[in-house]
Amino acid sequence: MIWRLLLLSSLLFQLVGCAVNPATGKTDFVMMSEQQEIELGRNYAQEIAKQYPRYADEKLQAYVQRVGERVARYGHRSHLSYRFTVVDSPEINAFAIPGGHIHIHRGLMAYLGSEAELAAVLGHEVGHVTARHSVRQQSQSAAWNILGQAVAIGTGVGAAGDVTSALGTALVRGYGRDMELEADGFGAQYLARSGYDPQAMIAVVKVLKNQEDFARAEAQARGQEVAPSGYHGLFDTHPDNDTRLHQVVAAATPLATGQGEVGRETYLKMIDGMPFGDSAEAGVRRGQRFYHVGLDFTLAFPQGWELINRPDALIVHRADEQAFLVMSLEGLQGGGGSQAFIRQRTGGRGLAAQQSFLQNGLDVTTGVLPGRDAKRVAVVARGQEAFLFVGAVKGRASLEAADEQFMAVIRSFRPLQADERALGQSRRLQLMRFKAGQSLEELSRQMGGEGDSLQRLRLLNGLYPTGQPLPGDWLKVVR
């Protein structure tokens, strides 16, 4: 038994390796070469492009690429070909994948207040790339899985593999506080060396912390116990007054060249006119309805349910995430109707309790796909298009517990009316100078939207929770 474990351990360490980290100078436990990392990143980038559409403003894309390249030029892996992409999503997020592919959501860009803050976000993500955080995570996770398999084989106890796999998952869950702080430290260095103010790193974390506080307050106002999670999960472990954060930024300050560029007005002019929230191209939420001008439809979802809008699917789900309805768009082969589509998909078997009817002039077939995990299925046929709905529940819940809500969503699907097309248009950021005698309360009433518009206006302009602008200050408002 012991010799078998020793042999398996020897094989394990032949599969893994150590490499000097180009950013830290320390020896890291890794399981891929830099060329493999680059190839992995290239493949990931292709998959991400399918789920996160590129924002269709090439002038802004070029601007973000220039800022990112300026920061990455001073990184520890400046030889990589970095690609910086703005994602057409309202989410407050940015992320890096191996090999130098960095994405920032326009939703996060709306809340940043300067070019230096943009550079801080990009520099933070470059820090993850230079320190090979994702590669180190992947290597640790893979090694735990291999070791778990070795223990299971060597001892004959299959559960041992489950235990070590769980330990590995716990070890590498998220980047963690140390890696996030390390990325901030490198990002601050790159900011300083590239001529930006390294204090922008602290300013960004404050923006993100305020966003989390605002989201928590909004969730409480809706009667929800847990606020939505934020960018990198920084807010519980990485507050803006963190002593270690200030230390790593202070350490980078002597590296600064010049006075430290901020670039507030330059940045604000670049995002002037950018969609805020949902974009017309992807579809727009207004209260409990969703409008898509390009695909000419609207539908409603139940009060208290959430909507996730992805390029490949529209998902509505109950707040407890135990019931989901997914809508996707597919082609109708040969121009057949909804019944023909169902027959083709079920191999001619059809659905239980199947029924067909006209709904707002559209051909609809619906029924239940039977089985242990029964699903509500519906098809709305229109010309050469099939809008496919699949509803399912998780855990021990039965389909009946959510089927009424599933059917309510399906029956709400219809073409847009003429006066609804305006509802499917994006709201956009607009720059203005604050004038003497104006009030934030007045401007917030003009913004519209859901929730506390006054606090949203403050949040957009770095004034949350009680700040006031001065006459002549640039403000971002939403029109």
Image: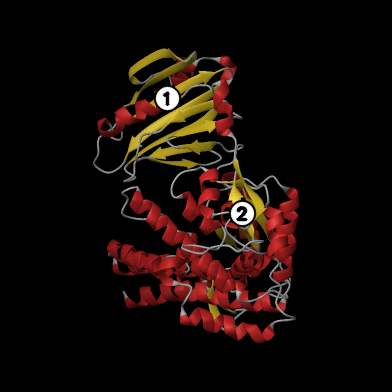
Q: Nearer the viewer, mark 1 or mark 2?
A: 2
Split into 4 quadrants, where in the image is the C terminus?
Answer: top right
In the drawing, does residue 375 fall left or right of residue 263? left
* Residue 186: percent from left, percent from top: 61, 77
Amino acid at the residue labelled 1: Ser
Q: Which residue is mark 1?
A: 412
Near mark 1 (Cα within 10 A), the count class, few <14, some 14-19 or many ≥20, is: some
Report the residue at 35% width, 26% height from top.
407
In the drawing, does residue 434 fall left or right of residue 247? right
Q: Quadrant of residue 378?
A: top left
Using the image as rendered, state which of residue 210 and residue 179 is in the foreground: 210
**Residue 211 drawn above or below residue 411:** below
User: Cβ–Cβ below 8 Å for labels 1 and 2?
Assistant: no
Amino acid at the residue labelled 2: Lys
Using the image as rendered, state which of residue 153 and residue 358 is in the foreground: 358
Using the image as rendered, state which of residue 73 and residue 285 is in the foreground: 285
Q: Quadrant of residue 100?
A: bottom right
In the drawing, does residue 159 fall left or right of residue 257? left
Q: Quadrant of residue 262?
A: bottom right
In the drawing, does residue 351 fall left or right of residue 43? left
Q: Which residue is mark 2?
A: 476
* Residue 312: percent from left, percent from top: 54, 38
* Residue 420: percent from left, percent from top: 54, 26
CA separation, marks 1 and 2?
35 Å
* Residue 2: percent from left, percent from top: 33, 77
> What colour scheme does the image use?
secondary structure
Q: Which mark is residue 4?
A: none
Residue 153 at least partly seen: no
Split into 4 quadrants, where in the image is the N terminus?
Answer: bottom left
Using the image as rendered, state which of residue 418 and residue 175 is in the foreground: 418
